[in-house]
Image (cartoon, grey):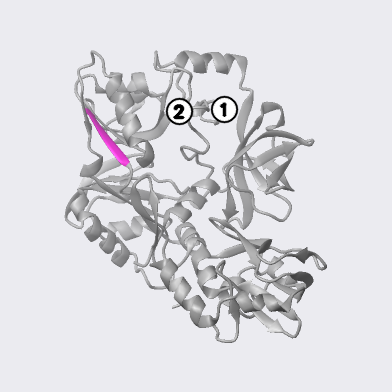
Amino acid sequence: MGGRMVDFGGWDMPVQYPAGTIEEHLRTRTHAGLFDVSHMGEIDVRGPEAIAFVNRLTSNDVTRLVDGQAHYTALTTPQGTVIDDLLVYRLAGDHLFLVVNAGTTDKDWEWISSHHAAEDVELKNVSSDYCQIALQGPDAVAILQKLTDVPLSEIKYYHFTHGKVDGIDSIVSRTGYTGEDGFEVYAAPEHAEQLWNKFLDAGNFGAAGGVLPCGLAARNTLRLEAGMALYGHEIDENTTLLEANLGWICKLDKGDFIGREALAQQKAEGVKRKLIGFEVTDRGIARDDQGIVIDDQPVGKVTSGSPAPFLKKNIGLGYVPVAHANAGQELKIDVRGRLVGAQVVKTPFYKRAK
Amino acid sequence: MANVPEDLHYSKDHEWVRVEGDQAIIGITDYAQNSLGDVVYVELPKTGEEFAANEPFGSVESVKAVSEVFTPVAGAVVTINESLADEPEKVNSDPYGEGWMIRLRMANPGDVDSLLTAAEYEDFTKAESE
């Protein structure tokens, strides 16, 4: 494909394909983008107490899922900070499928298996049994429908089904990490190349408005515009879910889970710092790890900063004291020694038209 | 294959220098712009600023990365390419022409003698990308 490759947590991954990050990003917003995200980890949890077990380790309420539904959630420490963010798929009442970040798969596996106590469940790290290809963008339904009999328009957002894609047994999930409609397709890894090529063909790769293969750089700018957290940036073992604006996946009333007590206490007391979105108002581009300054005082750090190709602005996420977290707050970003003006804005920066 | 014009001098940091009398025009090479990807922002010095050889004079930013740019020769800035403020993409589309960055009055015109020729630079980039 001519992608420019980098090492990403031990995986050789394309940063960008020949079209370039901006074109890949825009095409995903306007038509469709294709992402090989086979590096993601998968953990299989099976047994009569699968739901109870995962519910004890994660912050969202697994009992609310029905068969064929997935949700976004987090593995939490006793302090309410984040071991990883993940998707939990309910395949059946006694069978869950966890999709975790590549760089944290080993750590997650260690954590999950070490917390397996008396529950009647069988755990399997099945990361090498799956490839994952994401087709994202407004044309995703039409493109994927060419390759499957599964009635895609009947799959609701954050739902999935088993079916054949180009004759290959797959899980077809209406999820994604771009802020667009689209699908993530899981299948046995030996079919990855066939699926990839068929998706490109069905999406008229090479034609005007056709699908484009997208690299890690576009995946990052798309999720950032959509205001989604990236593990290791907005969330990690030093940030709590509440600080990261992920209170919506903290179901404190669901019963006990690791971190519940700390999160309930922090909720009662109020967070001291909060993740905010900002737009750069001067010339300049904010980057990860740069300092955030208010009234000449360093108050926090940029967790993700980048040009936003669709919005044509320079945007970022970062932590500031809660007193300065309101939209309209003026900030300065320390861009390699130069203080560049920015303003707190509501997130997501980008929201697709329904 | 990256374009490497014969009549320019090159640095190992992937800048090119075009000598006009005692002045030097400086930009980044085709190889460099291709490695960077879409250029979205170029930060340049002010007219009159002085630089030693191999000192950073500004930065070039793609969506993903920031790279410093170095002046291969010493001198004072005579003019900068103001148009890059609004059209940084010229660095990609025409790196040796409309994508030029700064024009210096050279403090020591002999500096260019230590730079790479087009053929030497071509060999250098081949070795680097292997």
Q: Mark 2 lies on which chain?
A: A
Q: What element carries label 1?
A: loop
Residue A243 shows which numbered tag?
Answer: 1
- Camera-side mark, 1 or 2: 2
Q: Name the residue under label 2.
A: A82
Does residue B35 appear in this view? Answer: yes
The x and y percentages for residue A251 are 45, 21
| B66 sits left or right of A133 in the view | right
Q: Which class describes the residues within 10 Å of circle 2: few (<14), some (14-19), or many (20+)?
A: many
Q: Does the magenta stretch include residue A172?
A: no
Question: Is the residue at mark 1 from the same chain as the one at mark 2?
Answer: yes
Position of residue A236 relative to residue A311, above or below, is above
- What chain does badge 1 belong to? A
CA distance for labels 1 and 2: 11 Å
Q: Give the range drawn in magenta.
A: A41-45
Residue drawn at (26%, 15%) of the image? A117
| Vertical position of residue A192 compared to residue A239: above or below | below
Q: Which residue is drawn at 74% across and 75% down?
A: B108
Magenta-drawn stretch, dominant element (helix, strand or loop): strand
Q: Mark 1 near mark 2, Cβ–Cβ under 8 Å? A: no
Q: Residues within 10 Å of mark 1 (few under 14, many from 20)?
A: many
How far across and how far down the image is residue B53, in percent?
69, 67
Question: Regarding mark 2 in the picture, which secondary structure is present there?
Answer: strand
Q: Which amino acid does label 2 sit on?
A: Val
